[in-house]
Image: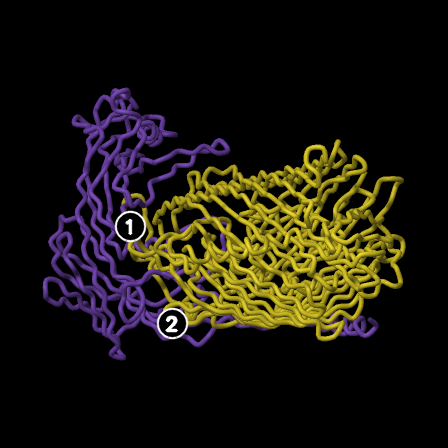
Chain colours: A purple, B yellow
Amino acid sequence: MITFKKALLLIIPALLLSCEENFSPKTEIKDTYIVTSVLGTNGEVNSLAVSVTVTRVYDVDGYDPYTNETDPFVHDADVYFTLRGKDYSAVLVSQPRDTVISRYKTREFYYQAIFPAPLPTEQVKLTVITPENKNLSAVTRMPRRSYFELSYPFNSGITTNINRFNWGDEWRITWNTESGSIYFPTLVLHYLQEIDGNTLNKYIQVPLHIANKDNRRNWINPGHTYDGSVEFNYANIDSVMSRISEGVEDKSTITVQEFILNVTSFDPNLSNYYSSTNGYLDELTVRLDQNIYSNITGGIGILGSYWESAQTFNIEKVYGASFGYKVR
Amino acid sequence: MLRPIKAVLLILILSFPSFAYYANGTIRGFVSDSSNGEAIIFANIYLQEIHYGAATNNQGYYVLNGVPEGKHTLIVSYLGYQSKKLTVFVASGKITEVNLRLSPGTIQLDELTVSGKRISEPMDISMDKITSREIQLLPAAVEADPIRMMQISPGVTTTGDVTAKFFVRGGAGDQNAFLINGATLYYPFHAVGILSAIDPEIISSLEFSKGGFGPEYGGRLSSILNINTRDGNKNRLSATASATLLAGKLSLEGPIPGGSFIAAGRKSYYSGALKNFLRNDDVPFDFYDASVKLNYSNDAISSGSKFTLFGFFSGDLMDFEDPLREDYNISNQIYGVSWRKIWADPLYSIFNFSYSGYSADLDPNLGESKRRNNDISDVSANFDFSYVYSNKDQFDFGLQSKFLSTRLQIENLLGNTSEIEQSGSDINLFGKYRFLRWENYSFDIGIRTKLVALSEKRPFLIEPRLAMTYRVIPQVMFKFAYGRYSQEIIALSDENELISVFEPWIIIPPEIASMQSDHLIAGLTFILNEEISFETEYYYKSLINLNEINRKKFDYRFRDLINLDGEAYGAEFQFKYENPSFYSNIGYSLGWVHKINNGVRFAPRYDIRHSFNILSGAKLPFDFQFSANFQLRSGMPFTPIAGYFDHLNIIKNETFFNFNEFLPTTLRGRVNSQRLPYYHRLDLGLTKNISFGTSDLSLGINAINVYNRKNIFYFDPDTGEQINMLPALYTFFIRVKI
């Protein structure tokens, strides 16, 4: 046992000296191209100007990628879209960048192509040929337009003065869905407010929930959903109507205009990408090596598309006036 | 289907005629602690004249069969107790009942140099029998923890200081069974795995089988942790109270007419004691565990019987006040009844009936977490028999049945929801014949056959199990074991989650094949004397149809689970020195484990190549006790950084989407292709015991990671920040026994 104790006496000081050591979690840099492009429409335009970003993998001193100040943009790529069998080349565009908030101090670059706005379910292909003649490509299929069904039609404008016994406490909106697509519903109140002789356009979103904590109210807005439905509590519509005049002495300076219901549908590729970059499991789980979705052949990144469907609702005059507002 | 069943029945039928045949006599009985009546497990029973002996089982029961007629000197001993020597008369064809009570103390009999324990023990290949002394010796960061004790056993690895979860010989965490009084405990942890839910105060025996286990165990590929709880003080009413920074404990035990009872409970009160374990230190951990056990014997009702009722309950609640933060609620409930019977023949039986329920719920409230819920209902009935022949051979057989239902509602990271609800029966028949008739050889030949299976794609119906030992010289034993194992229930644990709050159990879905494994183990045991032993084992383990979460399930078209194959192999060495005043356990293991996914071979995070551990404890003057534990192991595999790139960060504003913001992120290299630096840590503990009449007071202090080694846990994937495991920290505890 004496030998064992002696061994311990030798080992422990050695360990004390080895508490710190240099270690690098890096391996050889993998030269990879990243292509990013998202095209979207609401069906009311004839052509789209779509931007494409082509960048490369970079390295930094240390392990914090936020320290990188060199724009990884790839300048000499050949970029084009293919729609209905016709190619539309993209040109290199540059514009000043807000260097206060950006890590990169140079001008901002991107490729831009202009082509006819695709119709629902039409396929658009993106091809990028890098200066090293590497071919990257991806395809997106435009989502369908959403058509709404309403649990209460509000034919004479939005009001919460309805028979709740018959119609319930919530306004339910449903729409057609496609497998693999996610949807972002919003209901936004648009209004005008006169301040010091100026008329300002303002808007506020109707929340799904209002949570009370520490005498403060948390407004929880709708997130994304796979289901083709959303429900807004009439009490939350009332809360929004009240909230826009909090701290305003003369409520007649506010003119409520309309509620706009909007549903943005992402195609399955963009849906997967959004989920993989915005997924939040819980705050205790420590997860490593999470995959970011990519549909770029020959590299990584995303080519996605979205469609915005909207319906406008007037505000019933009596309802708007009950808050002291003008109603347009 | 019929063939294996017929074979088992044939074995049973052929065995029965010999039940009534006796050539010699039998000695059997129980060994208990005279101070409280608790069963003493693994005690040595030895017949001096014929050099024949045995060890008590986990109920304190022993049987010596084939004892020649006449007078014999029986010696019983156990470390920490005064050995006992008595004369026993054995009549041919008769059973002599000898119940023995040992007094705590350190007086040893000089002549007890070769004990009976050494004759029977080598059959238990890859088995660690952990004593409460060892559990108390291990310096604890928060609480003395029996499951942390597993982590120092050679062949057992862990992925960090934070979790008590462990991996045995290359098997995943859900391949370990936790049995408490025979019932399965599905979530044996508190506080996201920082400590176990099993209070060491309630433990009577703890057997940990790392592989090659016999046919009496099944349903898991890697290991069995079998915990038997204490019966309670049969002599007097006593109470124990103890406190640490984290939790308080109370236990009450005492005699009742015809038996005894014990009730123990533990409740946390200061979650700040765990703040060093997690990056966010405001997690409101709140947990409890409680157990109760009632024993009753009455020869007027049933001679040689013992009836036991027990319950075990644990719960973890994390209730954030903020409605935007999620709440967690996890609980276990176990209710059980057992009937142990010593029959007129040398037949011993145990009937266990138990219910084990588990529920885990993550409620996101109004936050962005994903709702997840898992419920398990497990009703088990086991009938186990053990018959000892006059030629010393032993036949163990039994029927084990389980009705299991699992329900899982889960929304994964990518927003896809799944609901899996399954139920089924699992009925197994096992038989094991132990050839103990030869002095230097022993063989276990057994099978476990499944009459009804839980999963649809089950690979085989018969699981052969073989074990043998050969005593080369009196001090050296060669051991060998082979076994085939299957598993039909899995925990959906993502190995990318170093800390995980939710690991739901499900029956393997019909589209996925059940897991299977073959164990091949060989080893040598050297026993120099009662104090010094050395063991070495070598293992190979095939891992077929492992079930893993499909991390590339981006939408509904992809499967939730995928099948992988793999294999594990390695060598283990363990040296033990143990006497009443000093204890040392030195272990080293060398291991490899890899998995293969679509032809790509990769190492899981628990593939630790080298692992070295020394646990030592010594009694010091003035009733002080000192302990030290040193761990050294090679670093965990990790996926290296292969560069950085700017990825689109989609921002949803109130009325529009911003598709122009790019954030830097890490490009990962080949999965787990590099390793973190070596891990090492020294923990020290000092305890002072003070006696006041019949009461005892213990005061202790533990120093964890005394030289503040910055062991790397992981690198933050977003910022590259190095996150270390536990820093140097100090804890203390106080325990009062009245």
Q: Is residue B368 visible?
A: no
**Residue at point 24% right, 47% down?**
A264
Amino acid residing under circle 2: Gly
Q: Quadrant of the C terminus of chain B?
A: top right
The image position of residue B310, as x and y in percent, is 63, 38
Q: Residues within 10 Å of mark 1 (few under 14, many from 20)?
A: few
Q: Quadrant of the N terminus of chain B?
A: bottom left
Q: Chain of mark 2?
A: B
- Residue toward you, B669 or A96: B669
- Residue toward you, A25 or A328: A25
The image position of residue B386, as x and y in percent, is 63, 52
Q: Does residue B208 appear to the left or right of B695 in the view shown?
A: left
The image position of residue B270, as x and y in percent, is 65, 42
Please give the label number shown on residue A255: none
Instruction: Kindly identify which residue carries mark 1.
Output: B657
Instruction: Kindly identify which residue carries mark 2.
Output: B599
Q: Is residue A276 visible?
A: yes
Q: Does residue B312 appear to the left or right of B702 in the view shown?
A: left
Q: Are discs 2 and 1 less than 8 Å apart at CB?
A: no
Residue A127 sits above or below residue A145 on the image? below
Q: Chain of mark 1?
A: B
Amino acid residing under circle 1: Phe
- Residue toward you, A189 or A172: A172
- Which callout, 2 or 1, points to the residue nearer the camera? 2
